[in-house]
Image (cartoon, rainbow, N blue to C red):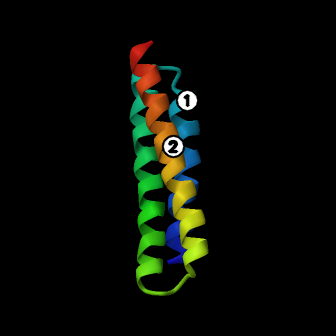
Protein backbone atom coordinates (compact mmCIF):
# COMPACT_ATOMS: atom_id res chain seq x y z
CA UNK A 1 0.00 0.00 0.00
CA UNK A 2 2.90 2.33 0.78
CA UNK A 3 4.25 1.95 -2.75
CA UNK A 4 0.82 2.63 -4.26
CA UNK A 5 0.45 5.84 -2.24
CA UNK A 6 3.93 6.97 -3.22
CA UNK A 7 3.28 6.25 -6.91
CA UNK A 8 -0.06 8.07 -6.90
CA UNK A 9 1.36 11.03 -4.98
CA UNK A 10 4.31 11.43 -7.34
CA UNK A 11 1.95 11.08 -10.28
CA UNK A 12 0.13 14.20 -9.12
CA UNK A 13 3.11 16.51 -9.52
CA UNK A 14 4.52 14.63 -12.52
CA UNK A 15 1.32 15.11 -14.50
CA UNK A 16 1.13 18.79 -13.59
CA UNK A 17 4.73 19.31 -14.74
CA UNK A 18 4.30 17.30 -17.92
CA UNK A 19 1.06 19.00 -18.90
CA UNK A 20 2.49 22.45 -18.27
CA UNK A 21 5.46 21.77 -20.54
CA UNK A 22 3.23 21.34 -23.59
CA UNK A 23 2.39 25.06 -23.49
CA UNK A 24 -1.21 24.43 -24.46
CA UNK A 25 -4.12 24.98 -22.06
CA UNK A 26 -6.26 22.20 -23.51
CA UNK A 27 -3.50 19.65 -23.01
CA UNK A 28 -2.58 21.14 -19.62
CA UNK A 29 -6.20 20.72 -18.48
CA UNK A 30 -6.09 17.05 -19.54
CA UNK A 31 -2.99 16.46 -17.43
CA UNK A 32 -4.46 18.40 -14.51
CA UNK A 33 -7.44 16.06 -14.73
CA UNK A 34 -5.07 13.11 -14.45
CA UNK A 35 -3.49 14.78 -11.41
CA UNK A 36 -6.91 15.26 -9.84
CA UNK A 37 -7.60 11.57 -10.40
CA UNK A 38 -4.33 10.65 -8.71
CA UNK A 39 -5.20 12.78 -5.69
CA UNK A 40 -8.49 10.87 -5.52
CA UNK A 41 -6.48 7.67 -5.60
CA UNK A 42 -4.37 8.84 -2.65
CA UNK A 43 -7.55 9.75 -0.77
CA UNK A 44 -8.96 6.29 -1.48
CA UNK A 45 -5.79 4.52 -0.33
CA UNK A 46 -5.96 6.30 3.02
CA UNK A 47 -9.65 5.45 3.30
CA UNK A 48 -8.83 1.78 2.75
CA UNK A 49 -6.07 1.95 5.37
CA UNK A 50 -8.46 3.56 7.82
CA UNK A 51 -11.24 1.02 7.24
CA UNK A 52 -8.72 -1.79 7.72
CA UNK A 53 -7.58 -0.18 11.00
CA UNK A 54 -4.04 0.10 9.64
CA UNK A 55 -3.69 3.80 10.49
CA UNK A 56 -5.07 5.82 13.35
CA UNK A 57 -8.00 8.18 12.88
CA UNK A 58 -5.91 11.33 13.29
CA UNK A 59 -3.51 10.27 10.53
CA UNK A 60 -6.41 9.33 8.29
CA UNK A 61 -8.14 12.67 8.79
CA UNK A 62 -4.92 14.59 8.18
CA UNK A 63 -3.69 12.79 5.07
CA UNK A 64 -7.06 12.15 3.44
CA UNK A 65 -7.97 15.78 4.15
CA UNK A 66 -4.80 16.97 2.41
CA UNK A 67 -5.55 14.78 -0.62
CA UNK A 68 -9.12 16.05 -0.80
CA UNK A 69 -7.99 19.66 -0.40
CA UNK A 70 -5.47 19.23 -3.21
CA UNK A 71 -8.08 17.65 -5.46
CA UNK A 72 -10.39 20.63 -4.90
CA UNK A 73 -7.58 23.09 -5.66
CA UNK A 74 -6.70 21.29 -8.88
CA UNK A 75 -10.39 21.26 -9.82
CA UNK A 76 -10.60 25.00 -9.20
CA UNK A 77 -7.53 25.58 -11.33
CA UNK A 78 -9.06 23.52 -14.14
CA UNK A 79 -12.21 25.64 -13.99
CA UNK A 80 -10.11 28.81 -14.07
CA UNK A 81 -8.21 27.63 -17.15
CA UNK A 82 -11.45 26.71 -18.91
CA UNK A 83 -12.74 30.25 -18.38
CA UNK A 84 -9.61 31.94 -19.74
Nearer to me, 55 or 22: 55
Q: Residue 18's spot in the image, x, y percent?
A: 54, 37
On screen, residue 21 versus residue 75, left or right, reads: right
**Mark 2 surroundings: few (<14), some (14-19) or many (≥20) residues within 10 A:** many
Q: CA distance from mark 2 to mark 1?
A: 8 Å
- Count of numbered circles in the view: 2
Secondary structure of the residue carrying numbered label 2: helix
Q: Residue 77's spot in the image, x, y percent?
A: 49, 29
Q: Residue at x 47, y 79 (%)?
A: 49
- Residue at the disc numbered 2: 15
User: Which badge, 2 or 1, is on the more N-terminal residue?
Assistant: 2
Nearer to me, 8 or 72: 72
Q: Quadrant of residue 31?
A: top left
- Residue at the disc numbered 1: 20
Q: Residue 21's spot in the image, x, y percent?
A: 57, 29
Secondary structure of the residue carrying numbered label 1: helix
Check the picture and name the quadrant holding the C terminus.
Answer: top left
Above or below residue 68? Residue 84 is above
Residue 11's tag is none
Q: Residue 15's spot in the image, x, y percent?
A: 51, 43
Amino acid sequence: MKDQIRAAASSISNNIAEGFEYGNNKIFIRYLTYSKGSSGEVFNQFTILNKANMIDEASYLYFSGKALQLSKKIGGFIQYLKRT
